[in-house]
Amino acid sequence: MARLSRERVLEAAVALADEAGLDGLSMRRLATELGVVPMALYKHVANKDELLDGIIDTVVGEIDLGPVEGDWRPAVRARILTARAQMLRHPWASGAIESRRNPTPAVLAYMNSVIGLLRTGGFTVDLVHHAIHTLGSRILGFSQELFDDTPADPGAQEAAAHAMKDTFPWLAEMALQVAHDEKSIVGSGCDDQFEFEFALDLLLDGLERLRSAV
């Protein structure tokens, strides 16, 4: 039998979640699948929360984030469809992502890559901010809002943004500008009503273009 490792534990957990869903994923059942006692798992994952973060990163980390040449639109579309294909291969993954209070490192890296495609494609930071709200969780291949709009301490938010600058530069740039840019068309921060109308207008404009093409 192969030696137990964190990678092996997470691979087995992904396989078990694929088979039984998140409700069927438990440390005891996972240990049985691996042929070990439950306590052996805790050498590699501290608890169920760490296990969930690990399997999310295992799945999202398989999405190709390599450089893309050409126009931003087909590049972003292809990346999102790749993410969707991954979510469809692992139907439990979207629920797991939604259940986490904070995005995992692989999710942050993925979001950073998409924001980078938009920025290098000519989008302003303000427009990227609204585009991300419009896409919502579709950016990761499923439908739900990505951001937790619960008010948080501005100082803590700014400190967190500065802390991620080296690792996730595009994401940090947007977070810092959104927090302070009073020139934004909605002012600093997020406005739920504006984001809803922004998305609605975009969808309606798209429908009108389709209608006119008939």
Image (tube, helix red, strand yellow):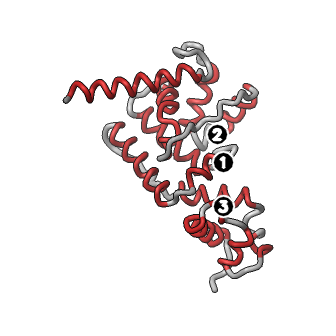
Numbered badge on residue 99: 1
Three-letter amino acid code of the residue under disc 1: Ser
Q: Is residue 83 left or right of residue 19?
A: left
Q: Quadrant of residue 51?
A: bottom right
Using the image, determine if residue 132 lies above or below residue 204: below
Q: Is residue 113 left or right of residue 30?
A: left
Using the image, determine if residue 157 lies above or below residue 25: above
Of 175 and 13, which appears nearest the observer? 13
Q: Quadrant of residue 117?
A: top left
Instruction: Tell me residue 212's x, y (percent).
Output: 22, 24
Q: Which residue bears the numbered disc 3?
A: 23
Mark in front: 3 vs 2: 3
Q: Earlier in the sequence, mark 3 or mark 2?
A: 3
Three-letter amino acid code of the residue under disc 3: Asp
Q: Earlier in the sequence, mark 1 or mark 2?
A: 1
Q: Quadrant of residue 5?
A: bottom right
Of 102 and 119, which appears nearest the observer? 102
Q: Which residue bears the numbered disc 2?
A: 164
Mark in front: 1 vs 3: 3
Residue depicted at x 61% and y 18%: 188
Residue depicted at x 45% and y 54%: 64
Q: Is residue 79 left or right of residue 137?
A: left
Describe the element under mark 2 as helix, strand or loop. loop
